[in-house]
Amino acid sequence: LATSSCKDDPKNIEPLVINFKKEGELSIKKSENDSLIASLDIEIADNDYETQTGMMYRDSLKRGQGMLFIFEKADYHSFYMKNTRIPLDIIYFDADKKITGIRKNAQPYDETSLPSDGPAQFVLEVNAGLSDIWKLEAGDRIEFTKE
């Protein structure tokens, strides 16, 4: 007769990892001359679960990728980096898809609130540093398509 206990069983707990899933394409354009700044493949967060989870549990994000949060209407929004493993730039856009603010270099696992400066309907998360490389400014805008 053999007995065993749960305590005796080694547990192999795998860390939760979520991989990027392309759900659309996004272009960022300069406000003054409509020139293309960057093109990205995007994953879209447009429901409660997706907006709450966001970029959590991701080990990487390629330079040509981002996550676009789409809200029903423009409002004040705040993000934080709980369970987020990679540094990000968080870019806020108004209902006209124009940049209203940028929170640069948000640090992994930091639960400090990163609020929008004004009402935002769209929020784009990309790798930290890209907003500086792209020289993004208030008024620059996005266009996107869903797949």
Image: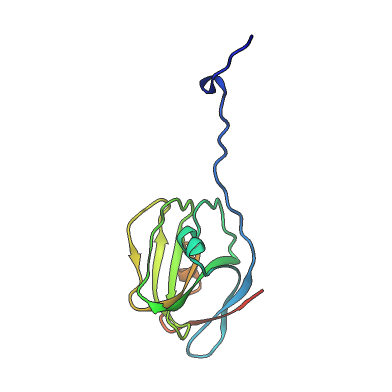
Q: Quadrant of the C terminus?
A: bottom right
Q: Quadrant of the N terminus?
A: top right
The image quadrant of residue 38 is: bottom right
Position in image of residue 36 (x %, y %): 58, 82
**Which residue is more in the foreground, 39 or 52?**
52
99 left or right of 65?
Answer: left
Q: Residue at x 46, y 86 (%)?
A: 96
Q: Residue furthest top?
A: 1
Q: Look at the image and tell me whether residue 141 can be seen.
A: yes
Q: Residue furthest front?
A: 1
State the scheme by which the image is colored.
rainbow
132 above or below 62?
below
31 left or right of 18?
Answer: left
Q: Residue at x 62, y 74 (%)?
A: 25
Position in image of residue 60 (x %, y %): 56, 54
The image quadrant of residue 37 is: bottom right
**Which residue is more in the foreground, 17 or 85?**
17
Position in image of residue 127 (x %, y %): 51, 62
101 above or below 34?
above
Q: Residue at x 54, y 19 (%)?
A: 5
Q: Look at the image and tell me whether residue 136 can be seen.
A: no
How many circles with numbers are drawn on the protein? Answer: 0
Q: Residue furthest bottom?
A: 33
